[in-house]
Amino acid sequence: MQFIDRTKISVKAGDGGHGKSAFRREKFVPKGGPSGGDGGRGADIVLEVDRNMNTLLDFRYRRKFKGENGENGDIKNQYGRNASPCIVKVPAGTMVFDDDTGELIADLTEVGQQATVAKGGRGGRGNAKFANSANRAPTFAEFGEPGESRNLVLELKLLADVGLVGYPSVGKSSLVANVSAARPEIADYPFTTITPVLGVVQTDYEKSFVMADIPGLIEGAADGVGLGHDFLRHVERTKLILHLVDASGMEGRDPVEDYHKINAELRKYSEKVARRRQILVANKMDLPQAQENYPRLVKLAEQEGIRIFPISAVTRQGLKELVACVGEALEQYVDEPEEEGEAKVYDAGAEDPERISISRNDAGDFVVAGKALEKLVAMTNFNNDEAVRRFQYIWRLKGIDEKLRERGIREGMTVHIGEMEFEYRE
């Protein structure tokens, strides 16, 4: 299966339905009051972790997701139907970033976990909602609020208990193949594994753990060289690292030097990853050259304060003991406390809706920005005089004329609010 671990998508939540402007017209009720109903709410875009997904491959073929709009209000105070949320399935381990700001929106790790990444628009109010003692027969209703839209980056980090690190061709794929049912491609050339492979390893009748054979790491990976960040991203989630070295040095490499170089890359990428518990695995012990190098590796393990296991992934020598040790280490594992603010779920209400900012664009026009104000513009029917008067009243109430004058606006200059632009008049 092709593995896709980073992709971009765009999402657009549903718009709210329009409110209705209507009056009761019934027999024996000659002057019926306003009876326009409210529009329904647009669909939210919700990401949900699905147990049947393990890659982001589906998003290669579909990158745009649009929520259904809410229904319009109707006569006799009938409300429009709210749209059902648009559920987008993602695999466990998906991190969601705002493509424009780089902000982490959600970190989805558990099956069934959800995150609302774009809020559907509120339904517009019908004219019945605007009736009051001063205006008993309002003729205007609101348009539906536009749904949020945003560009997202989805990034998958494997949720494996054990990650295998080491230079290409040290035998990681052979190890996974021999201790689990996974069948990665195996050959004697670098970068055979170019996509991560997960294998479930059974320690006894009831217990098991997930091992990840991740693409080989090379010097400079923390700076993005080779498969760099694609590799290191997946090591972050693991509880334990098996550090494989080719004890035989058959590829013209020194296993002790390799160990130090790999750890230098891990430290450069993330101190948290570098602190992860490691077990040194000396592979290819069936070869004579490995027997010569092994005492040096034992000394290295003593200096580093870690355990070492001599194995041969080909002959299966030492695999049973290694699996038992890994199972025991995982049972003793204690989760590191999360760094404050490390993972969160997007909250559309966190931003202050009443905050208003005024700036100038390249053409010298004034741009008025503010969540509540932009919503008001989008929901106002400017073809209705009553609706325009209401807009002007709120505009004055917020003191925007005064703010614009402070910024030096003059008669006839252009003002932009959301999708709308108009000429300024005193």
Image (cartoon, rainbow, N blue to C red):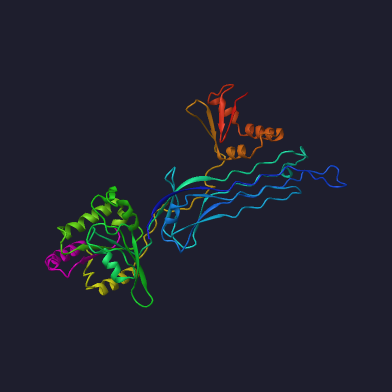
Q: Residue furthest right?
A: 28
**Residue 156 placement: quadrant:** bottom left
Determine the image quadrant of residue 201.
Answer: bottom left
Q: Is residue 7 magenta?
A: no
> What x and y, as percent, mark residue 260?
20, 56
**Along the viewing direction, whichever of 59 and 130 lies nearer the viewer:** 59
Left or right placement of residue 101 versus residue 142 in this view: left
Instruction: Indicate yes or no whether the magenta region holds residue 283.
Output: yes
Q: Position of residue 383 (x, y in %)?
A: 68, 34
Please state the extent of the stretch shown in magenta in the rendering.
275-304
117 or 69: nearer the viewer: 69
Q: How many marks?
A: 0
Whole-percent x, y for residue 336 in the image: 36, 60
Report the quarter where the N terminus lies.
bottom left
Which residue is depicted at the point 84% across and 42% down? 31
Would you say 46 lies left or right of 183 here?
Answer: right
On screen, residue 199 versus residue 130, left or right, reads: left
Q: Nearer the viewer, residue 184 or 381?
A: 184
| Residue in the image at 22% along x and 73% along y | 315
Extreme residue toward the top, this view? 411
Query: In the picture, which quadrant includes the C terminus?
Result: top right
Q: Is residue 143 left or right of residue 200?
A: right
> Looking at the image, which is closer to me, 186 or 342?
186
Please give the name of the residue rendered at 57% of the width and 46% of the height, measured from the top-left corner.
Answer: 147
Q: Position of residue 103 (x, y in %)?
A: 43, 46
Residue sitting at 56 percent across and 26 percent down?
A: 414
